[in-house]
Image (tube, helix red, strand yellow):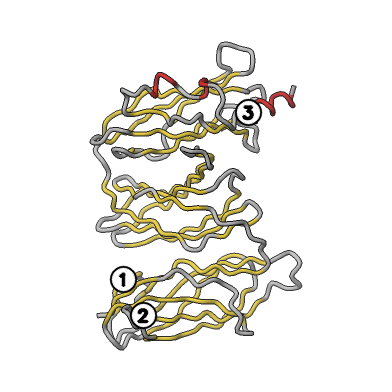
Amino acid sequence: MRILIMVLLGAMLFPASSGLSQVSDTAPSLTIMLDSNPPYVYRDSDGYTVVVGQVENNDAITAVTNIQIRANFYDDTSVEPLESSSGSTVIDVIPSLGSSPYVIKSKSPNSEITQVTVHLDGFEPSPSKLQQMTNQIGNLLYSNEVLYFSGTTYSADASSSNTAVHVAFYDGFIPPRILQVFSINLGDIPADEQVNFDFEEIIPRQAVGFYIFSESDTFDSDMISLKIPESSTLTKLVTISNVSLRDDGGNSIQDARVGLEASIQSESWIRFSADQPTNETEYTYYVQVKSLGEKPYVEFLGKYDGVYTTAGTASQSVTWIPENPGAYFIETFVWDRNNMPISDPGPFALVSVK
């Protein structure tokens, strides 16, 4: 019986019967509807059945909130559901012409569940949230089904409370299906400040890309789509992320001042292979500040010498006292003591000197 159940669950990973979509909810006359794709259904490591899909707001004017979604779970013989679970979308307010994933899990780890139906039960109109949040990520690294990256979420003009950044993976179907969603709670972000975050998770094998987006009590962000890089074999690799400029008090700044000390900071992420004799690696972190323009010149070159002793993240900082006003961009590199690069260049950071 267990083999039969797993076969049936495997079939649910692909478009099959209309029972996996709610026909009455996707009538052309309705502007709020479930995605036309059947939801993605899988069994998690604890035995719960998880349903992942998407709700679309096709209204060109009105945002919606309080979206109610119900999933009914069946075995392969009964007419009545074994159990039902209700939930909402990942983001609270779906903007006009926007969409949001949803994730609903069965109430129990019931191995008899083989079929699922999903219904849109209701929603309410809502004022739109201002798009005053911005997400940026550094280098992507994918190995052994694990995706790694670091990122920042920035809140402009006003503080942002109860902030979360969401990462939703999708497959290669046209249109794509949402496969899994991860949420990272960032708490409160002061106005004109950014918060750093790291992502390191095993992701679905079928995933070809992911959306990243954020929402707080009052603001939200654009939904950015990124492709998953080709898988690589990790031996010893450093990833640079979160390059920022700081004043002497450690506060993040966008503008520097001529003659005033500032520090260029970043994080590096290092991993080691299991067959290395030691994890201790001496390195030099280089910072290069170049002018913007047709013929950029090097305004500043600095370095920081350090030693990696464990896998994980480490911080580096180089002091810079600007000498000339203008617009510049910051480049960062990590080399070993044999002058061999052990990282890709870090993400560019723009800075203005006044």
In the rendered image, which residue does mark 2 sit on? 262
Residue 197 tag number: none
For residue 80, side relative to residue 328 (left or right): right
Q: Name the quarter where the C terminus is drawn.
A: bottom left
How far apart, in angstroms, are the residues tagged by discs 2 and 1? 11 Å
Which residue does the image show at 62% across and 84% down from the upper left?
Answer: 337
Give the image quarter of residue 7. top right
The x, y position of residue 46, in whole percent, is: 65, 35
Dot 1: what SS? loop
Q: Is residue 175 above or below residue 107?
A: below
Q: Is residue 221 left or right of residue 75?
A: left
User: Mark 1 or mark 2, which is nearer the start of the sequence?
Assistant: 1
Q: Horizontally, is 253 left or right of 225 in the view? A: left
Residue identified by numbered label 1 = 254
10 Å crowding of disc 1: few (<14), some (14-19), many (20+): some
User: Label 2 crowding class (10 Å Cα cut-off): few <14, some 14-19, many 20+?
Assistant: many
| Residue identified by numbered label 3 | 11
Horizontal arrangement in the rendering, residue 110 relative to residue 191 (left or right): right
The kind of residue on which mark 1 rests is Gln
Task: Check the image and report above or below for 254 versus 291.
Answer: above
Residue pictured at 45% horizontal, 68% vertical: 347
Q: Nearer the viewer, mark 2 or mark 1?
A: 1
User: Looking at the picture, does residue 76 appear above or below residue 283?
Assistant: above
SS assignment at label 2: strand
Residue shown at 60%/84% (left/top)? 339
